[in-house]
Amino acid sequence: MLTNSKRTKCEVYSRVVGYLSPIQRWNKGKLAEFYQRKSYKLAK
């Protein structure tokens, strides 16, 4: 594991209703919903 001095903090953004927003600012309920999401690929 890297020491804290060698790590770089990154922000995760998610698109909600057409707007990108950092998930760090979300409340607990919205964060829980974000981590339960599933991704789907549509057939062409």
Image (cartoon, rainbow, N blue to C red):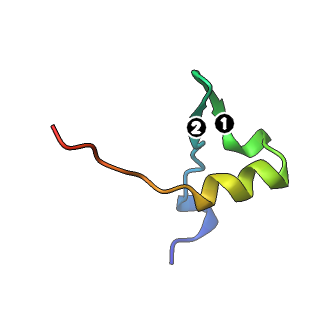
The correct choice, above or below, for 22 with respect to 40 in the image is above
Labels 2 and 1 touching (C-beta < 8 A): yes
Q: Provide residue 17's location: percent of width, then percent of height.
A: 62, 25
From the viewer's perspective, tell me whether residue 11 is left or right of residue 2. Answer: right
Count neighbours of disc 2 (C-alpha within 10 A) and say few if under 14, some if 14 to 19, many if 20 or more. few
Quarter of the image holding residue 3?
bottom right
Count neighbours of disc 1 (C-alpha within 10 A) and say few if under 14, some if 14 to 19, many if 20 or more. few
Which residue is farthest top?
Answer: 18
Q: Provide residue 11's location: percent of width, then percent of height.
A: 60, 42
Quarter of the image holding residue 28?
bottom right
Which residue is farthest front?
Answer: 43
Q: Residue at x 27, y 43 (%)?
A: 42
Secondary structure under tag 2 reads: strand
Foreground: 9 or 4? Answer: 9
The correct choice, above or below, for 11 with respect to 38 in the image is above
Q: Which residue is mark 1?
A: 22
Residue type, mark 2 in image: Tyr
The C terminus, quarter of image: top left
Q: Provide residue 25's location: percent of width, then percent of height.
A: 78, 40
Which comes sooner in the sequence, label 2 or label 1? 2
Q: Residue at x 65, y 30 (%)?
A: 21
Secondary structure under tag 1 reads: strand
Which residue is farthest bottom?
Answer: 1
Residue type, mark 1 in image: Pro
Residue 13: mark in rendering: 2
